[in-house]
Image (cartoon, rainbow, N blue to C red):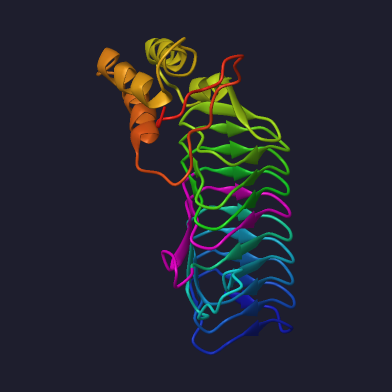
Amino acid sequence: MTVHPTAIVEEGARLGGGVEIGPYCVVGGQATLCEGVRLHSHVVIGGQTEIGARTVIHSFTALGGGAQMRQSNPPGMGLRIGADCIVRESVTISAGSAAGRGVTTIGERCYLMAGSHVGHDCVVGNEVTLSNGVQLAGHVEVGEGVMMGGLSAVQQFGRIGRNAFISGLSGVAADVIPYGSAIGLHVRLGGLNLVGLRRRGIARENIHALRAAYRMIFEADSGTIHDNARRAGECWPGIPEVQEVVTFILADAKRPICPARSRRREPSESE
């Protein structure tokens, strides 16, 4: 373990074997750095923050600060970052809030590029990539393997399903289905994330079934998205990717489902 003489490590902080703390870092007394964690210079870690093994934190990053909320919020709520993550320059991640889950969670093997922000009470899955300047508001859920392009943003309580792709400069105000590819200032589905599906090794027949289910759900001439999702679930009961999308759509959520780019208006569940 090496700690630069200009760094401040408060009493009570727990440091694992092989931890490296660079110049002018500040590590709070409730923080836990697991084995092999490396902090570049000028990193600030506060609150009940736990950083998983071998994660690398670059300069001018602030982790575990209080939730950015106007109302009173007790300090010291939790932040958990998994193993083998890379957190680049000037990233900010807020701790959970007393009004929410109480903890913000980042999975393993995530890559958070420069200037990205993860708000309070978010849940970010494994192997997620947030490109430069991505902004996640509070209570957002991002599934495993999601790729978000630069300067995209997600509204509070939004959900992005597993292995979805969000293009750069996109504003996400509706839930994006697993495997979806969402594009635009106010995003619409442009289809499925076929590149991501192939990279994940999804079987060809499952991709074909998922594409057919997508057309049934989002491109049918009649029916609501929810009704069509129920039909798709009945048509492809043995395809886990289809069932995942159907379950996502039918979940009790706070945001509507992101519609597909289409010439027809998507009817709502209430219609």
User: In the visual, does 44 lie left or right of 260?
Assistant: right
Q: Residue at x 58, y 42 (%)?
A: 173
Q: Is residue 151 left or right of residue 101?
A: right
Stretch in magenta: 97-126
Q: Main secondary structure of the magenta part?
A: loop
Residue 51 forms part of the magenta stretch: no
User: Which one is in front, 18 or 10?
Assistant: 10
Quarter residue 100 falls in: bottom left
Q: 193 above or below 147?
A: above
The percent coordinates of residue 258 (x first, y second) are 53, 32
Where is the N terminus found, in terms of image quarters?
Answer: bottom right
Q: Quadrant of residue 243?
A: top left
Question: For this view, does 133 lie left or right of residue 109?
Answer: right
For image coordinates 53% across by 84% down, the residue present is: 29
Q: Residue furthest front?
A: 271
Residue furthest toward the bottom?
A: 11
Look at 42% across and 18% down and name the residue there. Answer: 217
- The residue nearer to you, when weighing 51 against 260, is 260
Q: Nearer the viewer, residue 68 or 18?
A: 68
Q: Position of residue 45 (x, y in %)?
A: 60, 73
Above or below residue 209? Residue 26 is: below
Give the image location of residue 25, x and y in percent. 69, 76
Residue 184 visible, this angle: yes
Q: Is residue 81 visible?
A: no
**Residue located 51% across and 22% down the image:** 266
The quarter of the rendered structure image containing the C terminus is: top left
